[in-house]
Amino acid sequence: MSTTRRGALVLGGAVIGGALLGMPRPAAAKNDAEDLIKAFTGGASVATGKVKLDLPDIAENGNTVPLAFTVDSPMTADAHVVAVLVVAEGNPRGGVATFHFTPDSGVAEASTRIRLAQTQNVVAIAKMNDGSFFSDTRQVKVTIGGCGG
Amino acid sequence: MSTPAPRPRIRLDKKEAKAGDLIEVKALVAHIMESGQRRDKDGNVIPRKIINRFTCEVNGKLVFACDLEPAISANPYMQFKFKAKESGKVVLTWIDDDGSKIVGEETLTVS
């Protein structure tokens, strides 16, 4: 194959393009929300209910989206929430936070501020001390993405 | 660290309580929470630097903790509650990726 000028340009472009694509790009990694949920539940079935996730319907700034949740539980030594996993399905990475509770927490609720890259579902899964799991999902429309894309 | 550890801002909704009362804690600490997803203008990935763990201990007993991921906003804010049992120290700890700790403390009186 003779190397023409056009051929060289195409080849050069392909090399540069390939180099750009081939760079380690954490942002391009697959969202691991599903794997995180599996690891958290150990494959156990998750029922809806008990968890109430509170997020705005529309977030104008994805860099700081208020998130709050409450889990319906008496929080006694016999029946309490052990942990709550929060994942974001549309972020570069799925993990948001894992909250750990004890009977001394009194109630299973917390709030923080999170980053959302785009419009997506946020899922909260509560692990009870008896090994059962409950979840709630909320969709948030994001006007300006967070995570500094 | 080149800059001194930031002083966290902690607020308990009451500092004097009866046993069994729920105490609401609001805590904020200045931290960049660099996600490790961003690039500088030369296209290099800015290394991740976040607070990855937050704990609240009352008289040395853990009552609440949180594992943080890069999806937590800069200057992480935490609000939670715990049940007052006895007077003592409420110690909040933020642990950075580099192992450094930011510690804040409040005193609670339980009657």
Image (cartoon, coloured by chain):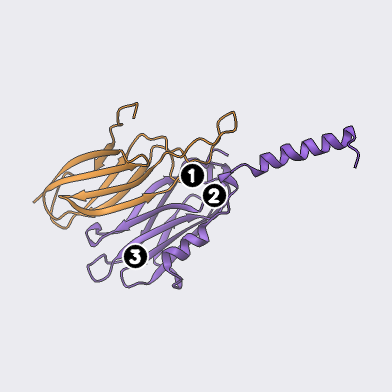
As measured in the structure, the alpha-carbon distance from the residue carrying label 3 to the one carrying label 1 is 26 Å
Chain A tint as drawn? purple
- Badge 3 crowding class, 10 Å Cα cut-off, few under 14, some 14 to 19, many 20 or more, is some
Residue annotated with mark 2? A91
- Note the chain letter of the orange one: B
Under mark 2, the amino acid is: Asn
Farthest residue in the left direction?
Answer: B111
Under mark 3, the amino acid is: Asp
Under mark 1, the amino acid is: Arg
Left or right of B60 in this view: A18 = right
Residue annotated with mark 1? A115
Closer to us: mark 2 or mark 1?
Answer: 2
Residue A120 position within the rendered picture, expressed as x and y whole percent measured from the top left = 56, 53
Say above or below: A44 vs B36.
Answer: below
Closer to us: mark 3 or mark 1?
Answer: 1
Residue at disc 3, secondary structure: loop
Residue B5 position within the rendered picture, expressed as x and y whole percent measured from the top left = 30, 31
Circles 2 and 1, Cβ within 8 Å, touching? The answer is yes
Q: Are marks 2 and 1 on the same chain?
A: yes
Indicate which disc residue A72 carries. 3
Say above or below: B94 vs B43.
Answer: below
- Badge 2 crowding class, 10 Å Cα cut-off, few under 14, some 14 to 19, many 20 or more, is many
Front residue of B105/B41: it is: B41
Left or right of B62 in this view: A117 = right
Residue A33 position within the rendered picture, expressed as x and y whole percent measured from the top left = 51, 58
* Residue at (65, 44) in percent of width and height: A22
